[in-house]
Image (tube, rainbow, N blue to C red):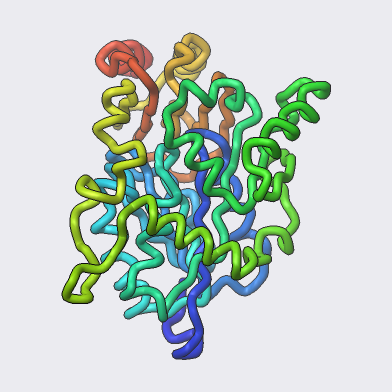
Amino acid sequence: MVQPLKKAPDEEAQVIIVSGFLGAGKTTLLKRILSWGKDLSSTVVIVNEFGDVGIDGSLFTGTRSGILELSGGCICCSLRPGLIETLRQIQEQYRPTRILIEATGVADPSAIAEVIAKDEFRDEMALSKVITVLDADFWEERENLGSFYLAQVHSADLILLNKIDTANEYEIPELLQEIHETVPQAQVIPTVHCNVDKQILWTESSPSKSASKVELISALTGDNQNSDGKSDSRSCADHSHENHETESELRRLGYISFVFIESLPLHEECFKKFLDALPFEVFRVKGPVRFGDRTVMINYAGGRSEWMDWEDLEETRLVFVGIKVNPEEMIQRLEKCIKRT
């Protein structure tokens, strides 16, 4: 767990934002970072989930870092006040040397960077790097996924082109070239399971680049001072998202999140068939699933699923994220898999 007062009073906490579309591999990257063995006792992780039930925080049980979870919305919009308050508490209670923020898959990193650049945090923390994890399979669909997807790309200092093992070998050079042409300022690393060198992740962006990014954020968001010298504290709906996707716009695009919770076990074969039959409009299914003799953690994204043994046998808790899907229909199909006797 994070120990308080680990950094010097005049030392800034380095903030790393981890962004990426749903299922790209953000949690895999954080789990890898937290398992490296380096002393992380003064590192705090903030996990943000789009759904109402948090899943990711439980995946980091046993790590040496503090895990703080914000769920039920996006920290760059409806949960923005919660992020600000969380950062205040982190500074007061822990004074860490590093803060990792895993943003929800529909977040715009520049709006989170705007919070880091607020006057009250400028002497306490500094944006070190924005890392964006890209699923190689989703790049071709980038124009259809909403402007926040491209914002994640354009905000990045480091892009991990993940899951290249699922792409055709001849496509990888073309993908890399297209991404480099889209964001020539970013470092692009092809990865499998977000396997990346520590030095690449921990190296900070150049000061000139970080300063330019803060200036760009201020220009986009209108984060100016009033005539009395105080920062403008209008809500994000008033100013910080005039040029970004807001949650209302996500709803307009048809993005939806819903939860399935069941204390009775499920039939495993029925559940496998359920996953196999999911429409492509379901981007993500994540959470523990209880079967008769075991519980597994399901991580489904883009038509593929990973299963991991899970110790907790209490209940099934699945979070779904998709676009223009019918939650009632999904839940009814899942209820047919419940073992009632």
Q: Residue at x 80, y 30 (%)?
A: 173
Q: In the orientation shown, which residue stands out farthest toward the front?
A: 227
Residue 237, horizontal then vertical, whole percent: 22, 45
Q: Residue at x 31, y 21 (%)?
A: 254
Quadrant location of residue 170?
top right
**53 up-or-down from 84: above or below:** above
Residue 314, horizontal then vertical, whole percent: 35, 40
Is 230 left or right of 76, judged from the image as shown? left
Closer-to-camera residue (40/161):
161
Closer-to-camera residue (218/53):
218
**142 up-or-down from 8: above or below:** above
Quadrant location of residue 215?
bottom left
Residue 79, horizontal then vertical, whole percent: 27, 51
Q: Residue at x 50, y 42 (%)?
A: 152
Residue 231, horizontal then vertical, whole percent: 24, 69
Res 105 seen here: yes
Q: Residue at x 29, y 64 (%)?
A: 224
Res 262 seen here: no
For the C terminus, the quadrant is top left
Q: In the orientation shown, which residue stands out farthest toward the bottom?
A: 9
